[in-house]
């Protein structure tokens, strides 16, 4: 049987599958819904320094081959999160990673320092949130490096930086966050998109522009992983975007990812990780793959 364990910088995971932030709540409140035994880690929903109420409805809508969401990173703020989940995350049957978000650099550091006092096992930095000037940190290499550097100074936990497919070139941002002290990269977050109802003439989301995810963004995610792996070949990458089958996992590994995150697919099939794992093991047996690491960057060029 194929060895499913993978090395992700300083962390060893029992499986290459990771549950993406924003699709599995706080993780601990889905114990009876998701089969955590097939995941290497699960990332809790992003938390900010103060409560964020999010956008008014409509906040989610199907669009083309994917989904638009404009929830606005609704969360209770770090103090409430600590009271509700700070201890509980340590009892989860899967390693839980926290996710930090803020509108300024000090805010990221504040949340990361607080999470370090809990039992989360790593911290993911959600760089796609706009800074106080209105530009997402993930589009600015210098700002991204400063955020990661600030988080690095307040925690000894492993750090992952979540990049945006809208960054051009994404390799420049990858190099910057590597310099800032990231242990791995998550590539990528949702792409910015919009949609309209021709009958009512209203936008599909109250905020007009939101994040686009699902099957349709996988080619974008694969391109981003390829470019990121080329820019920082020594830094592990978690491929993310449009994953709903074992074949998609293999694609991201071939592109250069060390692990693969499942996101939007959880909303339709909470236990999809079990099927993906079963089919992935069958793929490994069929192709004589002894370990997940054998597939990393193993695309066969024409």
Image (cartoon, rainbow, N blue to C red):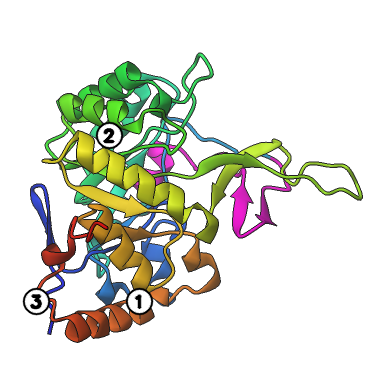
Mark 2 surroundings: few (<14), some (14-19) or many (≥20) residues within 10 A? many
Q: In the structure shown, which secondary structural element does the residue marked by tag 2 occupy?
A: helix
Q: In the structure shown, which secondary structural element does the residue marked by tag 1 occupy?
A: helix
Q: Residue 65 location, x and y as percent?
A: 61, 60
Question: Measuring 50% from the left and 20% from the top, which residue is drawn there?
Answer: 135
Question: Measuring 87% from the left and 48% from the top, which residue is drawn there?
Answer: 198
Q: Which span is picked out in magenta?
A: 56-84
* Residue at mark 1 to residue at mark 2: CA–CA distance: 32 Å
* Residue at mark 3 to residue at mark 1: CA–CA distance: 17 Å
Question: Measuring 34% from the left and 80% from the top, which residue is drawn there?
Answer: 274
Which is in the foreground here, disc 3 or disc 2?
A: 3
Which is in the foreground here, disc 3 or disc 1?
A: 3
Q: Name the image quarter holding residue 185.
A: top left
Which is in the foreground here, disc 1 or disc 2?
A: 1
Question: Measuring 43% from the left and 34% from the top, which residue is drawn there?
Answer: 48
On the picture, is 177 further left or further right than 201?
Answer: left
43 in the magenta segment: no
On the picture, is 8 further left or further right than 31?
Answer: left
Residue 295 visible in the shown view: yes
Q: Quadrant of the C terminus?
A: bottom left
Of the residues under marks 3 and 1, which one precedes in the sequence? 1
Q: Which mark is residue 112?
A: 2
The residue wearing badge 3 is 290
On the picture, is 99 further left or further right than 266?
Answer: left
Mark 1 surroundings: few (<14), some (14-19) or many (≥20) residues within 10 A? many
The residue wearing badge 1 is 276
Q: Residue 152 location, x and y as percent?
A: 18, 29
79 in the magenta segment: yes
On the picture, is 145 further left or further right than 189?
Answer: left
Q: Is residue 29 above or below residue 173?
A: below
Q: In the structure shown, which secondary structural element does the residue marked by tag 3 occupy?
A: loop
Q: Is residue 238 above or below residue 116?
A: below
């Amino acid at each position: 049987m194929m060895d499913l364990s993978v090395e992700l910088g300083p962390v060893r995971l029992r499986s290459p599958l990771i549950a993406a932030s924003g699709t599995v709540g706080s993780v601990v409140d889905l114990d009876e819904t998701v089969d955590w035994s097939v995941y290497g880690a699960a990332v809790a929903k992003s938390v900010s320094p103060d409560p964020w109420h999010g956008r008014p409805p409509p906040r989610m809508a199907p669009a083309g081959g994917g989904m638009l969401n404009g929830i606005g990173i609704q969360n209770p703020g770090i103090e409430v999160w600590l009271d509700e989940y700070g201890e509980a995350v340590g009892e989860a049957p899967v390693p839980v990673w926290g996710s930090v978000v803020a509108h300024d650099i000090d805010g990221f550091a504040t949340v990361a320092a607080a999470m370090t006092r809990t039992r989360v096992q790593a911290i993911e930095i959600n760089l796609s949130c706009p800074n106080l000037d209105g530009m997402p940190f993930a589009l600015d290499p210098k700002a991204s490096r400063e955020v990661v550097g600030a988080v690095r100074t307040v925690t000894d936990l492993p750090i992952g930086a979540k990049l945006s497919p809208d960054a051009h070139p994404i390799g420049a941002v990858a190099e910057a966050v590597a310099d800032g002290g990231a242990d791995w990269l998550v590539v990528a977050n949702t792409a910015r998109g919009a949609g309209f109802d021709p009958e009512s003439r209203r936008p599909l989301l109250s905020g007009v522009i939101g994040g686009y995810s699902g099957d349709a963004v996988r080619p974008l995610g694969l391109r981003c992983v390829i470019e990121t792996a080329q820019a920082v070949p020594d830094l592990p990458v978690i491929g993310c975007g449009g994953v709903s089958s074992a074949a998609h996992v293999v694609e991201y590994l071939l592109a250069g990812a060390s692990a693969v995150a499942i996101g939007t697919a959880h909303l339709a099939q909470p236990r999809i990780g079990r099927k993906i794992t079963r089919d992935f093991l069958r793929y490994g047996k069929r192709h004589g793959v002894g370990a997940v690491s054998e597939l990393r960057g193993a695309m066969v060029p024409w």
